[in-house]
Image: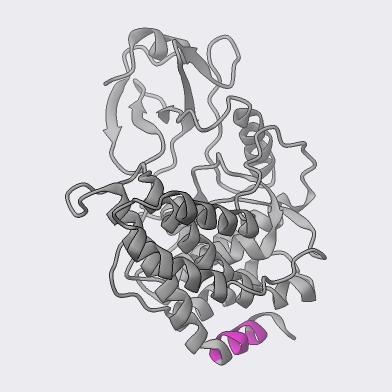
Amino acid sequence: MLPTAPILHAFGFEGATLSRVESGLIHRTFRVDTLGGPSFALQAVNPIFAPEVHEDIEAVTRHLEQKGLLTPVLHRTKSGGLYHREGEEIWRALSWIPGKSYDRVQHPAMAGEAAGMLGRFHRTLSDLRHSFRARRLGVHDTPRHLAALEEAVATHVGHRLRKDVAPLALEIMTEAAPLPDLSAIPERIVHGDPKISNVLFSASGDRAVALVDLDTIAPMKLPLELGDALRSWGNPAGEDAPEVRFDVDIFRAALAGYAAEGPTLSAAEIGAIVPTTRLIMLELSARFLADALHERYFGWNASRFGSRGEHNLVRAKAQLGLAKDFDRHQQELEAAVRAAFEP
């Protein structure tokens, strides 16, 4: 459904040309080409995000812009608002940044570019002072996710997938213990969802130019952000593949790119990179397994999987398999960290 006339009027987009942007699962997005003027991304914001998230986006993107880092910025409504409410929907407009996005890392050089962009993003935000309004608390609360899986297995005793899920759940619980201790590591402002599709590349594809999808920006312990990026980028087969492997060359290139462009990391942050990357794999496997029993997945691919449960089961097995392959490269991974960050 196209945006209505009142929505377009709210942002001053009367007479503009609209086209649907098909990529992305969270928001409904349209490209807006104004008459003789700039282009924008007009989005119906997914209700999982509170309207206050726009105050966080405004603070972060204006800081990035002032420091010279390319970023999408909010286009205010005619009345000066950061968003427009139409019925039960929240709409917003962001400046359009031309470029290309990818669903998977295609080679190590791409990982190095993406990591360099992520590093610049972190470094540029290191002096921002902002009280975040819409934090997603508990995103990487691993004990909570493990407990949720344990509860799902205990309560869904009659579920058709329980016989497949239960032994995998026990294996994840075993593999995840003991958890890495991150208590001494302070929080930094991070992107929060550093998958490769949120890195915008130049038209040629050889240069990372910006980070997009900024609803998840918030303070977090940096190894969790890096671990999420590295486990995602280092799995070229993707989350839905039955056979996965961890690409050490991508890991190595990403670390080198981040070290060259990012902030100076503490010894504790550096030491936590490898164990936290593995932790994220197990945490996601636990989340996907619980969701298999709960039958919930907004991105369910009905053309490939018979149900949300089956899709999530494949994703859970993939992350667990990735963690096991990651373990086989332990010495190489630790050496890559030392080569990137130690003088």
Start-end of magenta stretch: 332-339
Q: Is residue 28 left or right of residue 57?
A: left
Residue 204, visible in the rendered structure: no
Residue at x-position 79% and y-position 71%: 266
Which residue occupies the foreground of this view, 217 or 309? 309
Q: In which quarter of the view is residue 136 placed?
A: top right
Residue at x-position 45% and y-position 62%: 207
Q: Is residue 331 left or right of residue 288?
A: right
Residue 255, visible in the rendered structure: yes
Q: In which quarter of the view is residue 242 placed?
A: bottom left
Q: Is residue 206 left or right of residue 150?
A: left
Number of numbered tags placed on the structure image: 0
Residue at x-position 64% and y-position 59%: 143
Which residue occupies the foreground of this view, 342 or 260? 342
Establish if 144 lies above or below 46: below
Question: Dominant secondary structure of the magenta stretch?
Answer: helix
Q: Residue furthest front?
A: 158
The x, y position of residue 118, in whole percent, is 58, 59
The x, y position of residue 309, in whole percent, is 32, 51
The x, y position of residue 251, in whole percent, is 50, 77
Q: Specify whether residue 26 is painted magenta.
A: no
Q: Residue furthest right?
A: 184
Q: Quadrant of the N terminus?
A: top left
The x, y position of residue 199, in whole percent, is 46, 54
Q: Quadrant of the C terminus?
A: bottom right
Establish if 267 lies above or below 225: below
> Coloured how?
one colour
Establish if 164 lies above or below 171: above
Q: In which quarter of the view is residue 61 placed?
A: top right
Q: Residue furthest left?
A: 303
